[in-house]
Each structure stands twice: as C-alpha cells, then as structure tokens.
Amino acid sequence: MAALIPRPRMQLAPGAVHVPGWLGVEQQRELVVACRGWATGPVPIRHTRLPRGGVMSVQTVCIGWHWQPYRYTRTAGDVNGSRVAPFPDWLAELGRRALVAAYEDPAAGDGYAPDTALVNFYDGRATMGMHQDKDERSGAPVVSLSIGDTCVFRFGNTENRNRPYTDVELASGDLFVFGGPSRFAYHGVPKVFPGTGDPATGLASGRLNLTMRVTGLPG
C-alpha cells in the first residue's frame, strides 16, 4: 500500500524540482510507443562509444540533434551517417507544460523551445556516472521524464562530481526539471531497481529516460 501514498513535489536546489507521478499511464504508453519508433531509426538506438574507448552501459537514441561526445550534429557520423528524426511539436508542448508544473508558474513555459531530446534506456545493470549537461549553448532548463523501473537519481552541485549531492528515487511517470542556478549541476544514475515498473505503461522491463534540451545551435 505504500505505493498509494502520494509523494510530494520537492525542490532539491534552486531551479531543480522533482514532480512525482506527473505523467499518467496513458501518457507513458504513448511515450513508450514514440520511443520505440525512434529507436528503430533513421538513426537506431546504440551504446555510445566514448573518446577514450569506453562504451556507455545505457543505450541512447537522439531526436532533433544527434549527440555524441561531446557535441551535437544533425547527422550521426558515429552510427550510420543518417540525419536523426525531427523533434516533434507535441513533445515541445509537453516540455512547456512540464516547466509550468515544476515551477508552479503559468508563464514558466513561455518561450521554451526544446529542439533535441536524448532517450536513454537502462536495463537492470546500466548506470550513468556523474556528469554535466554542458554541450548545449543555451542555459534553458532540462526537462527529464522517467518511465519504467525506478532508479536512484543523484543530483549534485555545479562545481564537481563529489558531495554535496542528494539521492532521490525517480519512479515511472516522474518529472524532474533542472534550470536556473542548477542548470549545470552534476547528476547521475548509480542504480536501477529491476522489476519495479508497471507493465501497463507498455514497458515490460527496464527504464526509459527522456531529457529535452535547448541546444542554442542554428539551423
């Protein structure tokens, strides 16, 4: 019965807000369908290879702009050379509504025009080390949506990967926004809890995380 107890909205730091259960099950199902479509192409989902030879444990597919360490391009030269799928208007509108909900301000989404999203898929063993989202030329907020298995999300400071940081559990349907003074905070996912997601979302196992960003790039 503990899962039925509402989890409160929480501000972890100035500009960093967790809104539990923001997406309903039907919205989650729709996003799962969309993510599956993007995962099959035109640039398919893959494990990103890092410049020093390491391979990320999460699988990633991009829309709008293609991210590879540590830049954005329209085409995926590190995958198959194709242009990534376009960023849909309906997703940008969802991003604007997310900002209104997170910041509890009807004007929070005004002018917010995300033009790229990274979709990361975590199986039961995948993790994400502490990092900054700093390859964008814009300081607009990052909107993060979670579907599937619950994870530990570690949200830190803007100076380094070390403490102070706060661990919070992100469950299916949760929204997390970080902008303003927290826009370039280090963050990561040290653990996923397999089997904690709801199959009604259309995701039988694993965790999907979709993060919308504004690249600030022309064209």
Image (spheres, rainbow, N blue to C red):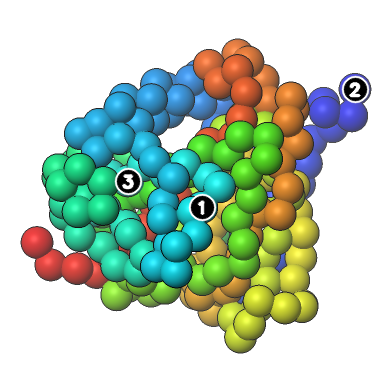
Which residue lies most toward the right here? 1
Judging by the rendered image, the residue that carries numbered circle 1 is 56
Q: Residue at x 82, y 26 (%)?
A: 4
Judging by the rendered image, the residue that carries numbered circle 2 is 1
Write down the quadrant of residue 25 in the picture: top right
Residue 149 visible in the current orientation = yes
How far across and how far down the image is residue 62, in percent?
32, 46
Task: Name the kind of residue labelled 2 in the image.
Answer: Met
Secondary structure category for the residue under label 1: strand
How far across and how far down the image is residue 106, in percent?
44, 54
Secondary structure category for the residue under label 2: loop
Image height of 60 relative to 41, above or below: below
Task: Name the kind of residue labelled 1 in the image.
Answer: Met
Q: Nearer the viewer, residue 47 or 97?
A: 47
How far across and how far down the image is residue 34, in percent?
35, 27
Could you tell me if the residues under marks 3 and 1 are in contact, i.e. CB atoms within 8 Å? no
Write down the quadrant of residue 107 in the picture: bottom left
Q: Earlier in the sequence, mark 1 or mark 2?
A: 2
Image height of 47 relative to 5, above or below: below
Mark nearer the viewer, 2 or 3: 3
Q: Earlier in the sequence, mark 3 or mark 1?
A: 1
- Distance, label 3 to label 1, CA atoms, is 15 Å
Q: Residue at x 39, y 67 (%)?
A: 51
- Distance, label 2 to label 3, CA atoms, is 37 Å
Q: Residue at x 43, y 28 (%)?
A: 31
Label 1 Cα crowd, 10 Å radius (few <14 / some 14-19 / many 20+): some
Image height of 203 relative to 211, above or below: above
- Distance, label 1 to label 2, CA atoms, is 36 Å
Task: Name the kind of residue labelled 3 in the image.
Answer: Cys
How far across and how far down the image is residue 166, in percent?
76, 65
Which residue lies most toward the front here? 53
Left or right: 104 in relation to 114: right
